[in-house]
Amino acid sequence: MCGIVGVVSHQPVNQLLYDSLLLLQHRGQDAAGIATGIGKTFNMYKGAGLVRDVFRTRNMRDLPGTMGIAQVRYPTAGSAGNAQEAQPFYVNAPFGITLAHNGNLTNWEQLKDEMYRIDRRHINTESDSEVLLNVLAHELQMATAGYSLDPAAVFKAVAGLHQRVRGSYAVVSQIAGFGVLAFRDPYGIRPLVIGRAETEHGFDYLIASESVVLEGQGFELLRDVAPGEAIFIDVDGNFFAQQCALNPTLNPCIFEYVYLARPDSLMDGVSVYAARLRMGEYLAEKIKREVSIGDIDVVMPIPDSSRPAAMQLAGKLNIDYREGFIKNRYVGRTFIMPGQAVRKKSVRQKLNPIGVEFKGKNVLIVDDSIVRGTTSNQIVQMARESGANRVVFASAAPPVRYPNVYGIDMPTRDELIAFNRDDEQIRESIGADQLVYQSIEDMKQSVRDVAPHITSFEASCFDGVYITGDVTTDYLDHIEFKRHALQESAGESRSQLNLNLDSD
């Protein structure tokens, strides 16, 4: 999960890009980067950390230009705090290109090998985004061989990229002295929206992962970038769009609506907030069937993303709604933090119970999802320590039983609490008196109720169906082996560091 932004303006864009990244900070807290273009020159600055920590006034002064792209990045196993893999990435041939990417390529290792053997391009990191950049650069080179660079050539290059690349990708890119390019994978897995603002000099255009960026910056939301579509805006503000995939279909990642996106975002015609309200309504109906409602005193959300579902659920069940946990907003989202030890420590730092709301009560706690179970277990413990009589735990999403390979950091089966466990075993593991999960069909219907035009979703972490058709058991085994190797390597590095510190 990452957040990306691209802009073409009649004014300097450095502050606009910085402010946009702040609005997308929830999508990535590991690294941030900005690249701007002025004439045929790029200026770039990026680093590990939160947006406010990466950029200083002197850095912003070194980012002139009226077009640019930016990204916030979340940590993955073995790469947390690795500034080398912060984006955007840059390549100097054929024209000078920068690129930022949200998603994950499932065939990036194969492509990396092709880059070296066939395309004669060197990949310097273990980032699939750098591979994606080089594929785009190669396709642009092929599309413009003997011809000038124009929008038709750009769209031809994106069509060639679609033929080679597998997985999920929403992309913003700059071509030096030419303009900003944005495109989305043919399945529409990761979100991308476009907006514009009218100025005295013409229209400024802004492309971002979520609509909150447009609204926060005073841009009008035009529409979503369609699956397989490419958008090109030249340096003069001329707008071009073309479908570049053969058989595009819309399959948005349903976890965006469950957890990832801000509730005030609108993506693929879906109000995230409205979808979460509907999830609460469907979950209330299931709780009625499985729980003795008369025994429940209060309903409590785990802030923040479960709040809409919990509020609607409480209203449907006619049970008092209470805020039982206060969130420290200066601690990162524990779901996307690397390492189990870090997540465990952060839960207690992030949430603090209000004891009076628990003492002597039977509480129904509502969370958006249960992934590793780390947070859920400690929340139940905090409720009991605060004096709760009974703790019923409800998840607005179904059990997360399968790895996600399309850009969410849950790629190994043994990290998922629901893998090879039934609901009763999960309940015992988190320590609740009763556990209720949303059904897969009710979760999907919650979004369909808001946007009936969406008939299919990328919901592989819940249903095990990988819509790109190239994810096999061998593939999952391979990425899990690599992940464990990275974790072991990171652990050895930390142990050596501690040893060196002790010897000092």
Image (spheres, helix red, strand yellow):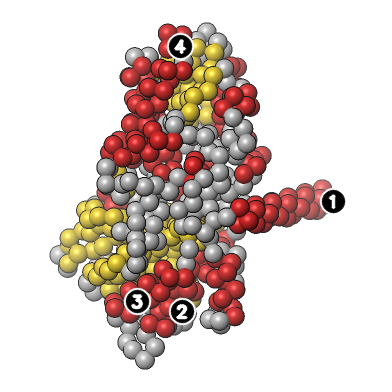
Picture quadrant of residue 44: bottom left
Q: CA distance from mark 1 to mark 3?
A: 59 Å
Residue assigned mark 3:
156
Residue type of the residue flagged with mark 1? Ser
CA–CA distance in space, label 2 to label 4: 62 Å
Q: Secondary structure at mark 4?
A: loop
| Disc 4 residue crowd, few under 14, some 14–19, many 20+, Cα 10 Å | few
Mark number, residue 138: 2
- Reading the chain from its start, which is encountered first: label 2 or label 4? 2
Q: Is residue 86 visible?
A: no
Residue on which disc 4 sits: 292
Q: CA distance from mark 3 to mark 4?
A: 60 Å
Label 1 vs label 4, nearer the camera? 4
Q: What residue is shown with label 1?
A: 503
Disc 1 and disc 3 in contact, CB within 8 angstroms: no
Residue, far bottom: 146
Which of the 4 quarters of the picture holds residue 115?
bottom right
User: Which three-letter amino acid code belongs to the residue tagged 2?
Assistant: His
Q: From what the image shows, is residue 407 above or below residue 122?
A: above
Q: CA gap, disc 2 to disc 1?
A: 50 Å
Q: Earlier in the sequence, mark 3 or mark 4?
A: 3
Asked if the residue at tag 4 contacts the one at tag 3, i.e. Cβ–Cβ closer than 8 Å, the answer is no
Mark 2 lies on a secondary structure that is helix
Instruction: Tally the numbered discs.
Output: 4
